[in-house]
Amino acid sequence: MKQQLYIKKCPECGGINLFWNKDKGEVICKDCGLVVEEKMIDFGQEWREFESDSGPSKRRAGAPMTYTQFDQGLGTQVGRKSDLSGMKKKSRNKFFRLRKWQYRISTAIERNLKLALAELKRVASYLKLPRSVEEEAARMYTLAVQRGLVRGRSMESVVAGSLYAACRRHEVPRTLDEMSEASGIEKKEIGRTYRFVTRELGIKILPSNPSDYVPRFSSSLKLSAETQSKAVEILEMARKAELTSGRGPTGIAAAALYVSALIHGEKRTQREVADVAGVTEVTIRNRYKELLVELDLEEDVKKVKKRKKKKK
């Protein structure tokens, strides 16, 4: 018996001639008739589907619970017009009234969640965020609504703050500028709401790792894999030298990429790097000087410049 390998023999007679009754969920000894196991759960695959139309009728479970829907996917709905086509006019009117009242009789929280979760899906789709981040953000927003944290604040700002917190928690690098562009809310307002929501909900979020931004910036600047790897090494050296603490992760990540590009002979201007990272040229220049001086990278950059002069 492949399904019941853990049952070796009958505890009553010691026989190994066991029979598994799938319909009753029982394991029976054929020698003495003892029911060895009962009320067993079938963890096997679902019934086979030969036609796509027959699939839904054979399924025993619905969709999983999700916070991206206001009722977590557990709500019911009165049938639509297509479902009521065969009924009499009086019965149809009755169901139409029930359907109308189902939409009307809803709490303030449900109405808020309907609008907010639709906005959350739109922003998450615009930023191309994974499903896990969207689910986490929806959970945070639902908790914020239930605790009355949305009162006195715009729904869009709380949605953007929840999404930014979820991105930080799942280590998906998105800047406040990108979040502001996607949601249409000012960057300062998103940051303020983000700090308020995480503080009130007791969510602990570690500081952003500058290395998380390197692949995105490198791809936008069309830099080689060697340049990207060198930038990660520079950031690790900067972290050990405590140069990353108290500084913006995007600025120092962009500066590390700029230094790495110079070392590998891939010329990119400070303006180009600053535009991709969403910071100013002054920030790139200041972080660049700090990295050169503190990590002794000036010699490597000078060697590259000398090679270029010799080639000319």
Image: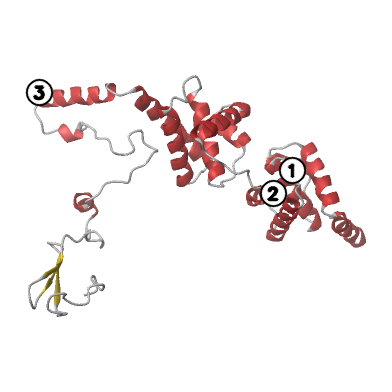
Q: Is residue 310 above or below residue 62?
A: below
Q: Residue 130 location, x and y as percent?
A: 48, 46
Q: CA distance from mark 2 to mark 1?
A: 8 Å
Disc 3, SS: helix
Q: Secondary structure at mark 1?
A: helix
- The location of residue 61, given as percent across then percent down, is 25, 49
Which amino acid, mark 2? Answer: Leu
Please say if the residues under marks 2 and 1 sit with CB atoms less than 8 Å apart.
yes
Q: Residues within 10 Å of mark 1 (few under 14, many from 20)?
A: few
Is the residue 291 above or below the residue 115 in the image? below
Q: Amino acid at mark 3?
A: Lys
Q: Earlier in the sequence, mark 1 or mark 3?
A: 3
Numbered mark located on residue 221 in the image: 2
Query: Where does label 1 land, which residue?
Result: 272
Q: Quadrant of residue 167?
A: top right
Q: Residue at x 36, y 33 (%)?
A: 70
The reply to whether callout 2 and callout 3 are in contact (CB within 8 Å) is no
Which residue is at the front of the view, 199 or 74?
199
Q: CA distance from mark 1 to mark 3?
A: 69 Å
Q: Residues within 10 Å of mark 2 (few under 14, many from 20)?
A: some
Say how the picture is coloured.
Answer: secondary structure
Q: Identify which residue is drawn at 77% across, 51% down.
A: 241
Who comes first in sequence, dot 2 or dot 1?
Answer: 2
Residue occupied by mark 3: 90
Q: Amino acid at mark 1?
A: Glu
C-alpha span from label 2 to label 3: 66 Å
Report crowding for label 3: few under 14, some 14 to 19, many 20 or more residues within 10 A (C-alpha).
few
